[in-house]
Image: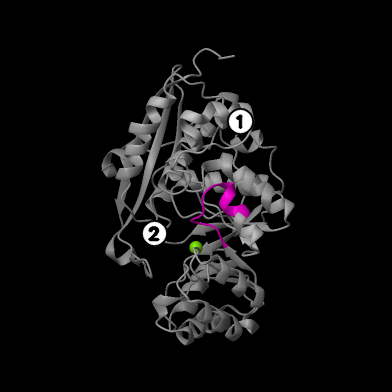
Amino acid sequence: MTIYGSNIADVTATWISCPIPYEKQHVSDFGRISSFDMALVTITLENGMVGYGEAKAAVGSQGSCEALVAIIEKEFKPQLIGKNSRQISRLWSLLYNGTRSGYGETEGRSFHVLGRRGIWISAMSGIDLALWDLAGKRMGTPVLDLMGGAAREKMDAYASGGWADVNTIGEQLRSYVEHGFKSVKMRVGVMDGSVSASVARVKAAREALGPDYGIMVDAHGTFNPSEAQEFCRRTVDLNLRWFEEPVSADARKAMTSVRRDAKMPISMGESEFTCFDFQDLIDREAADILQPDMAICGGLTEGIKISALAVANQLELAPHCWGSAFSFVAGLTLAFASPASRIIEFSLGANPLLKDLVVEDIDAVDGSFSPPTGEGWGLTLNPDFVTEYAK
Ligand SMILES: [Mg+2]
């Protein structure tokens, strides 16, 4: 039954590209990052209620969102106008299964269109997050409450950054823990030029922080298998919290063999799509920690399924959060709701989409977050920011 006014009246997508001042830009294997980009999805209902979501074109911060905007406005919008916004799972199935969505509904399984991975799923993520925002606002509760509420009182956050060279990495990471973070993540891999250089930077980090802080390392998939194994051997005494994407996410077999030999947990998942990709990682025993990105993997609807996979396999779930306030709060919400989560990523890169896109101040307190409390995602868009940085 359709409740009056809950049908979808309009769907828009806006590419927001916010330049980063040169002195605040960071450099990694992704290059010098000069902007943060996102596709802001806005869904308006017949009753005037508005929900927001985020879709990402790049797993880092910088990337063209033109294709995302086209998919959302040219492909998805015509399918969504007039549909009941309360049927989030059904609408997810509609976009995933296309003209065969009727079979999906009657048979209870997927009959996907061509875009079953990649940017099509990122675009679906933005729609899905906006629909969840509307669901919370309609009920007058945080999305978290619709998922069964918080599974814990606090969620530790780790400070995600760590690009500095061997001489300054200690100082950079100490500046993070001075803000209360108990764990930090630093980048390693091809940007260092050699395994030895990466190992030296991690040793310098451990020496600077001492034994009591968690250190994660992220190679962004840039080591080859033998380099990754060498890195693991040479950092075995540094008590790393996890080693993220040691090799390419496409090299599943190599990821499995690195994990088998490593004496530290292996994490991955930021560029995976749907629960089917995560099922594959689990089948291959490729990861200890699953890291779905809510603006990439298929949205919260898919995040819930990935959480269930983590729980059933007793793996850790640590959502990837490297985007705007919307994907951050969605990731935080999933983490709070999931029994498999105990830490969330918090970007220490200069990120105006996290800090200035919305009115609310999003920041860790003593290195942790409390459960979100506002209606929907609990975020108020800053329209001036959108106007200024819309492409
Ligand atoms: Mg990463």
In magenta, the rendered stretch is 268-279
Task: Examine the image and state in which quarter residue 236 appears.
Answer: bottom right
Q: Which residue is label 1 attached to? A: 141
What amino acid is labelled 1 in the image? Answer: Thr
Residue under the image location 37 percent in, 43 percent down? 39
118 to 268, vertically: above or below:
above
- Residue 264 position within the rendered picture, expressed as x and y whole percent measured from the top left: 65, 74
Residue under the image location 36 percent in, 38 percent down? 71
Query: Which residue occupies the foreground of this view, 198 or 69?
Result: 69
The colour style of the image is one colour
Query: Which residue occupies the foreground of this view, 91 or 113?
Result: 113
Residue 275 forms part of the magenta stretch: yes
Q: How far is the residue under mark 1 from the one under mark 2?
A: 31 Å
What amino acid is labelled 2 in the image? Answer: Ala
Residue under the image location 30 percent in, 44 percent down? 66
210 to 155, vertically: above or below:
below
Crowding around mark 2 (Cα neighbors within 10 Å: few <14, some 14 to 19, many 20+) is some
- Residue 328 position within the rendered picture, expressed as x and y whole percent measured from the top left: 51, 48
Q: Quadrant of the N terminus?
A: top right
Q: Is residue 370 shown to the viewer in this render?
A: no
Q: Which residue is label 2 attached to? A: 350
CB under 8 Å between callouts 1 and 2?
no
Crowding around mark 1 (Cα neighbors within 10 Å: few <14, some 14 to 19, many 20+) is some
**Can you tell me whether the CB of the residue at mark 2 lies under 8 Å from the nearest atom of ligand 1?**
no
- Residue 323 position within the rendered picture, expressed as x and y whole percent measured from the top left: 44, 51
